[in-house]
Image (cartoon, grey):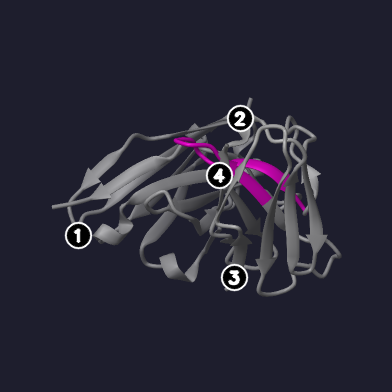
Amino acid sequence: EVQLQQSGPELEKPGASVKISCKASGYSFTGYNMNWVKQSNGKSLEWIGNIDPYYGGTSYNQKFKGKATLTVDKSSSTAYMQLKSLTSEDSAVYYCARWDRYDVSMDYWGQGTSVTVSS
Amino acid sequence: DVVMTQTPLSLSVTIGQPASISCKSSQSLLYSNGKTYLNWLQQRPGQAPKHLMYQVSKLDPGIPDRFSGSGSETDFTLKISRVEAEDLGVYYCLQGTYYPQTFGGGTKLEIK
């Protein structure tokens, strides 16, 4: 069974950085890209970017360049997203989602990680 | 970026009745390989999104066949033939033809 287990909620101060994890199981981690998606205030969804765990190559939404950095640890089948220079606009729920490059779909999703930025 | 526009914003449906959600894209989603990368997702209250359908009309494994998708180019529709209580939530369309991938604003399905 494919599972994506994300790290717990984060409370950070403005200007800080946070690193969220997404541990994959039930499939070959290096065989699928990992996407990251932002959901603000229970509203719609924004694609942040994705990473190829095999080669480490990344693709970012221009809006999130400089804000988000995607990495992976193949040895633990874990994907990470770091968000830096946090502001209140970064308060949201962040999801990792497996990317099926053949169907071109985000077929499995993590449970989400809440990030709250507050002084 | 490709803009995905969903209508209606919300709909209230009696159990056993059909429901229909429209999604329109600002550009044709037909890719050069002849495939159209339009997906549908469901987000139940308090849960993560769940993938329902890809390439317009192909259901994910385990998704009931009361869900169906249709459309082409810029106009797409998600239909539920007979709504059940477990279908409540927000439905999103998502295009994967262009980078960045973009989502519709969501349609909230409520049960009367």
Question: Disc 4 marks which residue?
Answer: A97
Of B98 and B109, the residue lying toward us: B109
Q: Do the dots labelled 1 and 3 sit on one chain?
A: no
Instruction: Give the residue displayed 19% in from the left and 59% down from the top.
Output: A15
Extreme right residue here?
Answer: B34
Magenta span contains residue B43: yes
- Mark 2 touches mark 4? (CB < 8 Å): no
Q: What is the chain identity of the residue bearing mark 2?
A: B
- Mark 4 vs 1, N-terminal side: 1
Alpha carbon separation for disc pair 2 and 4: 23 Å
| Residue A73 in view (yes/no) | yes
Which mark is in front, 2 or 1?
A: 2
**Mark 3 belongs to which subunit?**
B
Q: Disc 1 residue type?
A: Gly
Please name the residue shown 26% across and 47% down the image: A116
Drawn side of residue A91 relative to residue B23, left or right: left
Per the rendered image, the range of residues in magenta is B40-55
Q: Are marks 2 and 1 on the same chain?
A: no
Q: Which residue type does callout 4 highlight?
A: Ala
Callout 1 crowding tier (Cα within 10 Å): few <14, some 14–19, many ≥20 = few
Instruction: Name the residue carrying label 1.
Output: A15
Residue identified by numbered label 3: B3
